[in-house]
Image (cartoon, grey):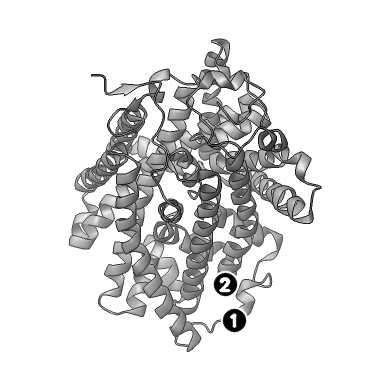
C-alpha cells in the first residue's frame, strides 16, 4: 500500500485553540529572541529598548489582524502565499510563499548550532567550544524535531506544549522576580516610565534603528495560519491564537528588556552578548538563575525549530498541491497525515547547509550574511499580506468604524511599516547580506515562471473578495485539496 497520495489533504480538526496559542508563542521564540537581540537592541536604542518593542508591536498587530481576517475567507496551509496570489497577483503570491520558505530554511540552519552549543554548555561549558560536537548535537535536535513534525499535528502540539510550557514557566517566574526587584529599586538604574515613551530615542534615526531590530523579534506567530487546515474552527481560531500569542510575547519582551535596562550595567549587557539572559538570571537568582535562563533559551530554540519546520513544510505542501512547485511536495502520508515529502526534502537541504556552514569557514560567513538578510524576506511577505487584507475587504470598509479601523487602516499601517523596515534594511545591512537576501528572492522567479508556463491553476485564481465569499456561504470549511477549483470564480473559498 502506498504511504502517500496527492489527493489527500491534511487532517482537519486536530488542534484546539489552546494548541494554536502555544504554537503562536513558540513561533516567536521569546527566550531565543531575547537572548539574540537584547544586547543589540540596547546598543541601538539604549533605555528606549522597551519602547521600541512596544511601538513595533502596534503595526505588527495590524499584520496579525490582516492574517486573521484573510484566514476567515480562505483556509489554506499556504497562508500569505494563497491570499496574496488571489488578491494582488499570483506572481506576488508565489514570491510571498517563496520568501517564507527561504527565511525559514535559513533560520533552521542558523538556529541548530546555537541549540547544540547551549545544550553542551549546560553540561560542561568547555564542550560548547567543540565545533564538531556542537554541530552533531544541534543536528540531533533538528532531526528530533523533524521526526516530531513528521509524526503529525497532534504529536507536534503535544511536544510543543511540553517544551514551551517549561520555557514559559521559567520566563514568567523570572519576569515576576525581576519586576519586583525593579519596583523595589534594587538595580543599576532606577526604572522610569519614560522608558516606554519617545524621549530616550536618539531622534528619528534612533527610533528607526530600535524598531528595525524589534521587528525581527516577533516573526513566527503566523505558524497558526499555516496550521489552519488542521485546526478546529480555524476561521476564528487561527487569528485569535495569533493575537493572544503576540500579546504574550510582547509582555515578555517588554518585561525582560525593562529588567535588563534596570538590573544590569551597560558593561554587563555589552559583555553578555548572547548570554545576557543568563547574566540577568544570575543577578535575579545567584547560583541557579543563570543555568535556568540558559535552559529556557535552549528550550525556546528547540521549540522554534519545530514551528519553523511546520511553516516551511506546510507552505511547500500548498505549493506542491497547486503545482507551483513539484507535485510530490503535496503528497500526504496515509498514517500520519503530514506532507512527508516536503518534510524529507526540507530536512535534507537544511542538514546539508548546516554541516557545510560549520565545516567550511567561507560557507559559515555566507550563512551569517544570509541570517542577517532574513528580515528582508519576512517583512516582504508580511507587508504584502497586509495589503491583501485591505484589498479583500475593500467593499466592507465603510460599513462601520470598526470595519474601517480593523480591516483597513490598521492592516494598512502594518503593511506600510513592513515595507519601510524592508527599505531601511537595504540601507543598513552589509552588501553581502543584501545580495543574498534579494538574490534568494529573485531565485524564486525560476520555478514561478516554469510552473506558470506549464499551466498551474494557481495562476488563474478566483479573486479573494470578502463580500463574495460571505455571500457564497463562507461559514462552511474551505476544501483546499482541489487545485483545479482555483478557476471556479463562483466559489472563491472552495479550492
Residue 313: where, in percent of width, then height? 40, 34
What residue is drawn where x is 44% and y is 72%?
A: 267
What residue is disc 1 on? 192
Earlier in the chain: of badge 2 and badge 1, it is 2
What residue is disc 2 on? 47
Q: Which of 250 and 65 lies nearest the eye of the viewer?
A: 65
What residue is drawn where x is 18% and y is 61%?
A: 123
Q: In the visual, does 311 lie left or right of 464?
A: left
Residue 211: where, in percent of width, then height? 61, 57
Q: Residues within 10 Å of mark 2 (few under 14, many from 20)?
A: many
| Quadrant assignment for the N terminus | top left
What residue is drawn where x is 29% and y is 69%?
A: 292
What residue is drawn where x is 29% and y is 45%?
A: 155
Q: Could one spot residue 242 in this view of the protein?
A: yes
Q: Could one spot residue 302 in this view of the protein?
A: no
Circle 1 SS class: loop
Question: In the rendered image of this protein, does residue 315 appear above or below residue 52?
Answer: above
Say if mark 2 contacts mark 1, CB within 8 Å: yes
Circle 2 SS class: helix
Q: Nearer the viewer, mark 2 or mark 1?
A: 1
Q: Residues within 10 Å of mark 1 (few under 14, many from 20)?
A: few
Residue 157: where, in percent of width, then height? 35, 49
Q: Which of 472 and 107 lies nearest the eye of the viewer?
A: 472
* CA–CA distance in space, label 2 to label 1: 9 Å
| Quadrant assignment for the C terminus | top right
Amino acid at each position: 500500500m502506498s504511504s502517500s497520495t496527492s489527493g489527500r489533504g491534511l487532517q482537519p480538526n486536530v488542534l484546539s485553540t489552546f494548541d494554536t496559542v502555544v504554537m503562536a508563542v513558540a513561533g516567536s521564540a521569546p527566550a531565543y529572541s531575547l537572548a539574540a537581540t537584547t544586547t543589540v537592541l540596547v546598543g541601538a536604542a539604549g533605555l528606549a529598548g522597551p519602547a521600541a518593542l512596544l511601538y513595533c508591536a502596534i503595526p505588527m498587530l495590524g499584520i496579525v489582524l490582516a492574517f486573521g481576517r484573510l484566514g476567515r475567507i480562505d483556509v489554506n496551509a499556504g497562508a500569505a502565499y494563497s491570499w496574496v496570489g488571489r488578491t494582488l497577483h499570483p506572481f506576488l503570491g508565489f514570491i510571498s510563499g517563496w520568501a517564507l520558505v527561504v527565511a525559514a530554511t535559513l533560520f533552521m540552519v542558523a538556529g541548530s548550532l546555537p541549540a547544540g552549543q547551549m545544550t553542551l554548555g549546560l553540561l560542561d561549558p568547555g564542550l560548547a567550544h567543540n565545533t564538531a560536537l556542537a554541530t552533531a548535537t544541534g543536528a540531533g535536535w533538528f532531526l528530533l524535531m523533524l521526526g516530531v513534525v513528521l509524526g503529525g499535528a497532534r504529536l507536534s502540539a503535544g511536544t510543543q506544549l511540553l517544551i514551551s510550557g517549561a520555557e514559559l514557566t521559567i520566563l514568567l517566574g523570572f519576569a515576576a522576580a525581576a519586576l519586583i526587584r525593579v519596583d523595589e529599586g534594587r538595580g543599576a538604574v532606577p526604572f522610569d516610565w519614560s522608558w516606554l515613551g519617545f524621549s530616550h530615542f536618539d531622534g528619528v534615526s534612533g527610533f528607526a534603528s530600535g524598531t528595525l531590530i524589534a521587528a525581527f523579534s516577533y516573526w513566527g506567530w503566523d505558524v497558526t495560519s499555516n496550521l489552519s487546515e488542521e485546526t478546529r474552527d480555524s476561521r476564528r481560531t487561527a487569528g485569535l491564537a495569533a493575537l493572544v500569542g503576540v500579546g504574550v510575547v510582547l509582555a515578555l519582551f517588554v518585561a525582560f528588556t525593562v529588567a535588563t535596562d534596570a538590573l544590569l550595567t551597560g558593561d554587563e549587557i555589552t559583555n553578555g552578548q548572547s548570554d545576557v539572559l543568563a547574566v540577568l538570571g544570575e543577578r535575579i537568582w545567584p547560583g541557579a538563575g543563570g543555568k535556568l535562563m540558559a535552559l529556557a533559551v535552549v528550550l525556546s530554540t528547540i521549540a522554534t525549530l519545530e514551528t519553523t519546520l511546520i511553516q516551511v513544510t506546510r507552505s511547500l505542501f500548498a505549493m506542491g498541491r497547486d503545482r507551483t512547485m513539484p507535485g510530490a511536495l503535496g503528497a500526504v502520508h496515509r498514517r500520519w497525515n503530514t506532507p512527508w515529502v516536503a518534510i524529507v526534502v526540507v530536512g535534507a537541504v537544511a542538514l546539508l547547509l548546516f554541516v557545510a556552514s560549520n565545516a567550511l569557514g567561507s560557507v559559515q560567513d555566507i550563512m551569517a550574511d544570509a541570517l542577517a538578510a532574513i528580515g528582508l524576506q519576512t517583512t516582504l511577505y508580511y507587508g504584502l499580506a497586509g495589503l491583501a487584507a485591505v484589498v479583500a475587504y475593500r467593499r466592507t470598509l465603510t460599513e462601520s468604524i470598526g470595519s474601517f479601523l480593523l480591516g483597513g487602516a490598521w492592516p494598512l499601517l502594518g503593511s506600510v511599516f513592513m515595507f519601510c523596515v524592508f527599505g531601511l534594511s537595504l540601507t543598513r545591512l552589509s552588501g553581502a547580506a543584501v545580495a543574498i537576501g534579494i538574490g534568494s528572492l529573485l531565485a524564486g522567479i525560476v520555478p514561478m515562471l516554469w510552473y506558470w508556463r506549464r499551466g498551474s491553476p494557481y495562476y488563474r485564481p478566483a479573486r479573494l473578495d470578502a463580500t463574495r465569499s460571505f455571500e457564497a456561504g463562507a461559514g462552511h470549511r474551505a476544501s483546499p485539496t482541489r487545485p483545479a477549483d482555483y478557476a471556479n470564480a463562483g466559489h472563491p473559498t472552495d479550492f
